Image (cartoon, rainbow, N blue to C red):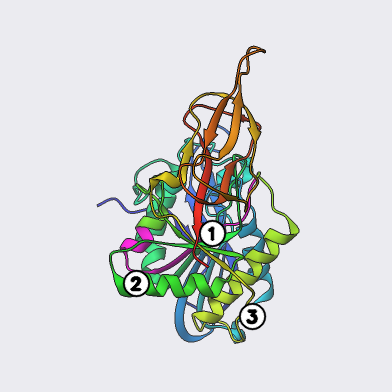
């Protein structure tokens, strides 16, 4: 059986606080005996649960890296009951390039699970987390936002699961995160996702979408930092009281939530994030790119709800998700 070549440069178990890397050998033109060095912090305190915390699963999403860098800097072992495994830049090659997928092998880490120990760089990263780190964890938090191509209302979310107890644990952790919006998410494509792999191992899992456009804002960074601490307090790993504010519960009950661009063109948005819509209401127009004088295509809402996500760049390609409409439950 092939063994994954990734090795941590620090102990995952020893008491205390250590900063190091996950070292992945990578021979290439400019470094025959080189390596991909993924930054890692491990904080071990009193006996207790383990939290595996990741950001930059996609390399152009920044709220997670900010919150996790802050946590790695600020938290000391005497505050921790259990263990924190902190990986701010999960997909490190993509993070350094500012791209969604790895520039090394063009693989989307969040569609590469369970990975392969003898696969490409991204497949090896996925396999190491799937087979080594996720089994150590009791709770997993993986930060996302819209990257360069999407923009979201800031929400934490759980997925619909078959196991009622696991579903309840995930729901409670999402509630504790206390983002301005909390969502029950129906993924458009769940095959190969980190989320799916973590949930298949029975873990409590929280993920997020905290904005987009390929940058963080002061507000989205605050939401990430607060939510992360809240989840760790909820899990009994950090002391303190959960910081709560009003949160709107959203649901995505069916595929009609997703609205796909029927053609390529220039987007004219007609609804902004957070606004309510009714069935048949125009969400956006798509104008031709190569001529004037032609009528635009108009995309209308397939269901009632609020606009929870939108395509971010001004030009959309046929087949892109143009808008997502979610249902407010409170």
| Residue highlighted by disc 1 | 208
| Residue 238 pos. (x, y %) | 57, 82
Mark before the other along the chain sequence, 1 or 3: 3
Left or right of residue 67: residue 119 = left
Q: Nearer the viewer, residue 43 or 183?
A: 183
Badge 3: few (under 14), some or many (20 or more) residues near its Cα, within 10 Å?
Answer: some
Q: Secondary structure at mark 3?
A: loop
Instruction: Work out whether 106 lies above or below 117.
Output: above
Q: Secondary structure at mark 1?
A: strand
Asked if marks 1 and 3 touch (Cβ < 8 Å), the reply is no
The residue lying furthest to the left in this view is 1
Mark before the other along the chain sequence, 2 or 1: 2
Q: CA distance from mark 2 to mark 1?
A: 18 Å
What residue sits 58% from the left and 54% below the top? 89
What residue sits 36% from the left and 67% below the top? 135
Q: Nearer the viewer, residue 242 or 143?
A: 242
Instruction: Work out whether 284 lies above or below 116.
Output: above
Mark toward the viewer: 3 or 2: 2
Q: Quadrant of residue 271?
A: top right
| Residue highlighted by disc 2 | 166
| Residue 112 pos. (x, y %) | 39, 46
| Residue 165 pos. (x, y %) | 32, 75
| Residue highlighted by disc 3 | 76
Asked if marks 2 and 1 touch (Cβ < 8 Å), the reply is no
Q: Which residues are magenta?
A: 197-212
Q: CA distance from mark 3 to mark 2?
A: 30 Å
């Amino acid at each position: 059986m092939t063994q994954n070549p990734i090795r941590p440069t620090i102990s995952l178990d020893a008491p205390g606080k250590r900063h190091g890397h996950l070292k992945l050998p990578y021979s290439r033109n400019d470094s025959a005996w080189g390596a991909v060095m993924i930054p890692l912090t491990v904080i071990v305190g009193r006996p207790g649960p383990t939290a595996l915390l990741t950001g930059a699963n996609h390399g152009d999403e920044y709220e997670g890296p900010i919150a996790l860098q802050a946590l790695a800097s600020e938290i000391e072992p005497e505050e921790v009951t259990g263990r924190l495994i902190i990986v701010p830049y999960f997909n490190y090659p993509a993070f350094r390039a500012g791209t969604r997928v790895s520039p090394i092998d063009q693989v989307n880490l969040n569609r590469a699970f369970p990975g392969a120990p003898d696969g490409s760089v991204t497949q090896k990263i996925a396999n190491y987390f799937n087979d080594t780190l996720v089994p150590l964890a009791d709770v997993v938090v993986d930060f996302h936002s819209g990257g360069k191509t999407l923009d979201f209302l800031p929400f934490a979310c759980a997925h619909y699961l078959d196991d009622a107890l696991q579903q309840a644990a995930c729901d409670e952790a999402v509630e504790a995160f206390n983002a301005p919006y909390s969502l029950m998410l129906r993924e458009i494509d769940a095959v190969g996702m980190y989320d799916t792999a973590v949930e298949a191992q029975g873990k409590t899992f929280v993920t997020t979408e905290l904005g987009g456009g390929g940058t963080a804002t002061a507000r989205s960074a605050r939401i990430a930092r607060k939510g992360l601490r809240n989840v760790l307090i909820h899990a009994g790993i950090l002391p303190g009281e959960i910081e709560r504010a009003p949160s709107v519960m959203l649901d995505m009950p069916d595929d009609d939530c997703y609205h796909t661009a029927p053609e390529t063109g220039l987007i004219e948005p007609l609804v902004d994030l957070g606004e309510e819509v009714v069935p048949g209401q125009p969400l956006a127009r798509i104008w031709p790119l190569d001529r004037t004088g032609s009528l635009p295509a108009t995309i209308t809402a397939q269901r009632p709800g609020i606009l929870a996500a939108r395509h971010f760049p001004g030009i959309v390609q046929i087949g892109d998700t143009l808008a997502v409409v979610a249902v407010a439950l409170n």
